[in-house]
Amino acid sequence: MPIAPLPGLNVHYRIDGPPDGLPVVFANSLGTDMRLWDAILPLLPEGLKLIRYDMRGHGLTDCPPAPYSMGQLVTDAERLLDHLDVRDCVFVGLSIGGMIAQGLTAKRLDLVRAMVISNTGAKIGTPAIWADRITAVEQGGIESLANAVMERWFSRAFRDTPDLVQWRNMLTRTPAAGYVGCSAAISGTDFIATTSTLQLPTLAIAGSEDGSTPPDLVRETAALIHSSDFHLIRGAGHLPCVEKPEEFAAVLTTFLTRIGHC
């Protein structure tokens, strides 16, 4: 379990694949950790250098007091990639991870040659919605939101399976300060202007049953980026890499192949 001692933050990360492989970096969603990507990694082409990390307040990374800013989350990713001497990666981010991807790409094009933004937007929700969720967690803990979050995250079919328990547990065991801190970061972020300036290979992925970032939001975000591709995974919610790992991995592999990154 390697830890990167970044300025003011110890970040938990993991690297799978050969050290000299082409780098693909994964950033997880609010209320999950790097295990979000477990199901798809074995399905990707051999020879890739697969880098995952837990963002601040999640997993085994430090949990500073809330609130956080999106600028801090982007800087965390930037410092980690600099620490690992990574350049020209494909950055794959889901939900808040997709926002980090957009912010990092706008800031450091030397780090990112292409990005995959899954179930995300240039702006997600409204400050009022996030303020309500932050208040709910502060007053009743993450448990008070858990059932509603599961409905937004997963299709009805998946919610009827035993697999739901592990994701509910992952959510509720997230430190409250980490959840609140990252919620504040999402609330304060509007990347529409900066994302519309990006011109790099981009794949946007949505889930047809996503109650957090509906397909239209993802499609609209993709439309901001010149020559982006959009793919809808039917029958999946907010975490299609969990519900439909084979399709998610196949679409990602096709994209990596098309841009010559595998």
Image: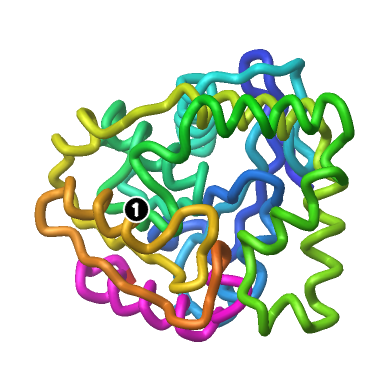
Q: Is residue 260 magenta?
A: yes
Residue 112 falls left or right of residue 21: left
Q: Main secondary structure of the magenta part?
A: helix
Considering only vertical position in the picture, is 14 above or below 130?
Answer: below
Q: Position of residue 250 (x, y in %)?
A: 41, 82
Quarter of the view holding residue 3:
top right
Q: Is residue 248 magenta?
A: yes
Nearest the camera: 243 or 258?
A: 243
Residue 19 falls left or right of residue 65: left
Residue marked by disc 1: 217
How many labels were placed on the picture?
1
Which class describes the residues within 10 Å of circle 1: few (<14), some (14-19), or many (20+)?
some
Considering only vertical position in the picture, is 64 above or below 34?
Answer: above
Q: Position of residue 122 (x, y in %)?
A: 34, 39
Secondary structure under the numbered disc 1 in the rendered image: helix
Find the magenta span and give its range. 240-261
Q: Which residue is rendered at x = 78% and y = 26% of the image?
A: 177
Nearest the camera: 62 or 261?
A: 62
Nearest the camera: 86 or 8?
A: 8
Q: Position of residue 242 (x, y in %)?
A: 62, 72
Identify which amino acid the numbered label 1 is placed on. Answer: Leu
Q: Position of residue 262 (x, y in %)?
A: 33, 72
Considering only vertical position in the picture, is 28 above or below 125?
Answer: below
Q: Which residue is rendered at x = 69% and y = 21% of the image?
A: 9
Q: Which residue is rendered at x = 54% and y = 33% of the image?
A: 80
Nearest the camera: 25 or 227?
A: 227
